[in-house]
Amino acid sequence: MKRLVVDDGTNVFEQLIGERLTLFCMNYIYTGKLIGVNKTWVLLTEASIVYETGELCDNTWQDAQRLPHDWRVNCAAVESFGVLK
């Protein structure tokens, strides 16, 4: 399938600031509200590490442990991401 992509110069994460994202990374799954981004890091608030997802279509995680502060995730470790739960 071919697809037309228009590069407006905006970082893909910048387009999602304010959304609650789920980041599937090399070692962990992180979730939280995206509040900041630069070329190297994304910054999540109300962040959690997800240890057990449960059904991905459910509205809640089976086991998500809340982190005590805002959390930074290195963009290089992110394998996929999106608005999930």
Image (cartoon, rainbow, N blue to C red):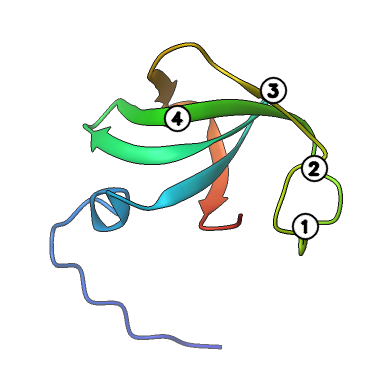
How far separated are the C-alphas under marks 3 and 4?
20 Å
Q: Provide the residue designation for mark 3.
A: 27
Q: Provide the residue designation for mark 2.
A: 53
How far separated are the C-alphas under marks 4 and 2?
17 Å
The residue lying at 53 percent from left, 49 percent from top is 81
Badge 3 marks a residue whose secondary structure is loop
First in residue order: circle 4 vs circle 2: 4
Q: Are marks 1 and 2 in contact (CB under 8 Å)?
A: yes
The residue lying at 23 percent from left, 50 percent from top is 14
Q: Which amino acid lies under the numbered mark 2 shown in the image of this protein?
A: Thr
Report whether 67 appears left or right of 75: right
First in residue order: circle 3 vs circle 4: 3
| Number of on-image labels | 4
Q: Position of residue 56 (x, y in %)?
A: 77, 57
- Dot 4: few (<14), some (14–19), or many (≥20) neighbours within 10 Å? some
First in residue order: circle 3 vs circle 2: 3
Q: Which amino acid lies under the numbered mark 1 shown in the image of this protein?
A: Leu
The residue lying at 69 percent from left, 22 percent from top is 27
Report whether 20 appears left or right of 16: right
Q: Provide the residue designation for mark 1.
A: 56
Q: Provide the residue designation for mark 4.
A: 46
Report whether 14 appears left or right of 13: left
